[in-house]
Image (cartoon, rainbow, N blue to C red):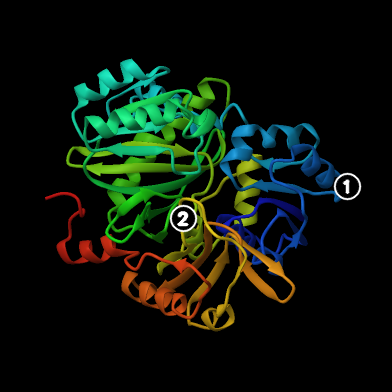
Amino acid sequence: MKVLLVGSGGREHALAWALCASPLLTKLYCTPGNAGIAQVADCVPIAATDFAGLTKFAQEARIDFAVIGADAQLVGGLWDVLEAAGIRALGPSKAAAVLEGSKGFVKDLCIEAGIPTAAYQRFSTPAPAKVFAATLGYPVVIKADGLAAGKGVIIAANRGETDKAIDFMFEGGFGESGHEIVVEEFMEGEEASFFALSDGTNVIPLAGAQDHKRVGDGDTGPNTGGMGAYSPAPVLTQDLEKIAMEKFIKPTVAAFAAKGRPYMGALYLGLMITRTGPKLVEYNCRFGDPECQVLMPRLKSDLLAALLAARDGTLQPLEWRDEVALTVVMASKGYPGATEKGHVIHGLDAAAKVPGVTIFHAGTEKRGNDIVAVGGRVLNVTAIGKDVAEAQARAYQAVDLITWNGAFVRRDIGWRALKRSVSGRPCNLP
């Protein structure tokens, strides 16, 4: 089977790595890919935003199945374009990808389907947004309605910060994504992610993970696309995973089916575990990044077979390894802002020899014999271990063998799981 994977990040490298293990696969292409993906797939220099170019290539290469990795392509309707051209693809459709494309839509869906979430209101002008934010008290959460590369959320500590954040969004701080905003109450608790796979009618659980959104140790600094993750997440007990499926994911899939826009594909549920139970933070319409980099090493089942089953309505439960997977994001100086590009990366071969370690590339490019850093998040150093402590130790052992000018990491990935293993309680709750 010839497969086309669309994307160029760490998530796509992890998907490519897992797809290559399938006996169903005969040829894997990736557009546009990166230096790491090029080691396991044929990379084709077509931008992920070039829907016409992607479709033409898929037809000429006689692609049997396409996997779309990133949110922008799904929200933009690439699934619809490929399917219309006769290329089987893993969704969701543009109509269903609004689940990630509009935070306001998701909040309204929660009310409609009885899904627990924070109090909120939607706004298209700044003045009433500021008035409502003041009624919630501080801190308060300000969200751009549309896609913002995982950075469109600002937690404001006081009125001044709130007004500034609202003005920033309406003045174009996140481009068109901020033409409408959501103002919601701040939820106190511990955040975790849970993943599922849907064929539009049926839905099966995948696994849980916990991300580290802030750029600095101790969860300090601005939000990023994610600085590291681990799976499973101890805060997501078996009981909470059942709640995630029964009270969040299944009602969501049912609501989309009732609206005539069946949701097919990976479903990413962001939960806040509060004193009064779990509440929805966000939904995403694809595998997370960097969560995918810890889910794939734990997956025992055939990924390609599972994704095909989601497309064709034949889903079956999947098998998972008991080991813990932990990934550390290596980023370039300045991230999540502007970064320098083109620095040569050293030590990749030595790092890959650390037991249990797999390195997934994100912002890399091969130039001659060198691999260089060309993005904000550059590498995902992932390790498997019998527990969080072992996986963390292996990952950082490998991290310390890799260098380039301006590289930095968080040194505390996994801290919540390690602390919870001692206290037995969610880290933000007394």
Q: What element carries label 1?
A: helix
Front-most of residues 29 and 370 = 370
The span from disc 2 to disc 1 (Cα, nearest Å) is 38 Å
| Residue identifier under label 2 | 335
Which amino acid, by three-letter code, is at mark 2?
A: Tyr
Residue 327 sits in which quadrant? bottom left
Residue 326 higher or lower than 315, as above or below: below
Marks counted in the figure total 2
Q: What residue occupies the far left of the structure in this picture?
A: 430
The residue shown at (38%, 54%) is: 211
Which amino acid, by three-letter code, is at mark 1?
A: Glu
Q: In this view, does 114 lie to the left or right of 226?
A: left
Residue 49 higher or lower than 399, as above or below: above
Front-most of residues 281 and 375 = 375
Q: Do the residues labelled 2 and 1 touch (CB within 8 Å)?
A: no
- In percent of width and height, residue 155 lies at 30, 39
| Residue identifier under label 1 | 60
